[in-house]
Amino acid sequence: MNARILILDDEPRMCRLLELVLKEQGYTIQTAADGEEGVILWKNWLPDLVISDLKMPRMDGLEVLRYRNGHFPETPFILLTAFGTVKTAVAAMKEGAFDYLTKPVDHTQLRDLVARALEEYGPGRSQRMIGNSAAMHALHKEISLAASTDSSVLIIGESGTGKELAARAVHDGYGGEKSPFVRVNCPAIPAELLESELFGHKQGAFTGATKDRRGAFAAADGGTLFLDEIGDLPLSLQPKLLHAVEQKLITPVGTTTPKKIQVKIITATNRNLEAMISDDLFRQDLFYRLNTLTLRLPPLREHKEDIEELALFFIEQFRKKNGGPAIRPTPDTLARMRSYDWPGNIRELGNVIERGCLRAENGVFTEEMLPKKMIAANKDANTDPATTAPLDLIGRERGLIMQALEQCYWNQTRAARQLGITRNTLRYRMKKFGIKKG
Ligand SMILES: Nc1ncnc2c1ncn2[C@@H]1O[C@H](COP(=O)(O)OP(=O)(O)OP(=O)(O)O)[C@@H](O)[C@H]1O
Ligand SMILES: [Mg+2]
């Protein structure tokens, strides 16, 4: 398992030694020379486990442990102590440390302890999908079915409905934690590099190919390859992907001998692939190959019964990350959430909760802490447009564009897709309405 481990020790030799032993086990390591530096790394790198020396300048091991309790209580923490400070170490365990190791560190003990801590805290295990509605129950059944075969799975659904989470759930059921799960986000990789990203290449195959590269298929061998946003896969690569999926053979760029691979393929998209097929933007034969099984993620407005549970879940996530008192939404806040349509689905709900939690006063999350548009949207819903004031078309269009941009974190490609217009059209409108990020 490729867990990330952060090591804090002011003695560089100690850091190097631990790093060496643990790297051999396949872990990824970062080190820091004191608590303060360690905390900065912790926040940015989000390790799965932290090993910290007790005595360090600036911020010592116990202070780091307290930081962990406040910010990352889900991350196992192992304390390193010199002989003679074992009492403190025992006290640290009472405060939440997983265990302690005494110096000089016994390598076997170190390896065992780390493996045990990671197993108990289960990093890499996917986030559970929240929701108890009939729609979610049906989805869970479909996920189990998809996990029980080698067949390819296509996941469709609007943006923010949980496609990536569903892909991981299928993988967990299919291969479990021990087999690899490799995700490739197709639009994030320039078209000319995607082939080698997927199939690997041989050193010297093209300018810049300074070393052999395995590629995503080979990395996922024996497990799952998740091709996210498959609608963005360039047409030129589609025959090669079809060939790889059908024949279970890949040919790295710059080689001629195909390699056998055994990979479960999961793909996801929020685009309408059938429409893309009619427009000659997606190959029909590939489409049929990829969607042996289809999982459709319902938009949140179709399972509003889950809103409250999801909201409480996101509030708890916020508290775990930021500490502070418990936060509770008022009944009015929950009612507002239920009557809103959630075009950005569960992702949008998560964002709304995070913003609300930041503004909550004395642990109370009132409806004023919801985005204005949610309150306005509710009012609109009760008025018949035919009998009210003239339609404010420009205002509405501007509003829709703003909404899409905010939901997509100002990613114009995505926002355009959500609005069903091209990116150029979006840019043109943004200019026309004077919309700028800010
Ligand atoms: N059922 C769920 N329970 C808890 N969290 C969820 C659930 N579904 C989605 N989420 C959370 O909502 C966010 C969006 O989910 P995800 O990234 O899987 O959506 P997506 O369908 O892939 O969206 P996009 O098409 O924009 O990529 C993530 O933070 C995810 O953890
Ligand atoms: Mg996604």
Image (cartoon, grey):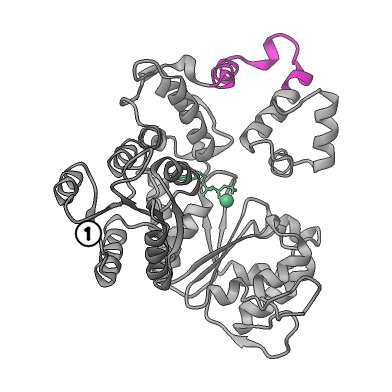
Can see residue 119?
A: yes
Question: Is residue 390 highlighted in magenta?
Answer: yes
Residue 107 appears at what percent x and percent y?
29, 70
Question: Is 382 drawn above or below residue 355 in the view shown?
Answer: above
> Which residue is more in the foreground, 324 or 242?
324
Of residue 34 and residue 406, the one placed in the foreground of this image is 34
Where residue 272 appears, x then y in whole percent? 68, 53
Q: Is residue 123 left or right of residue 152?
A: left
Tell me: residue 24, above or below residue 317.
below
Q: Kindly identify the amino acid type of the residue bearing the numbered disc 1.
A: Thr
| Residue drawn at 30 percent across, 39 percent down | 69
Which residues are the magenta region? 371-396
Q: Is residue 142 visible?
A: no
Q: Secondary structure at mark 1?
A: strand
Seen in the picture, residue 303 relative to 357 is either above or below; the reply is below
- Residue lying furthest top: 389
Q: Residues within 10 Å of mark 1 (few under 14, many from 20)?
A: some
Quarter of the figure with residue 115: bottom left
Name the residue that disc number 1 marks: 102
Q: Residue at x 80, y 42 (%)?
A: 423
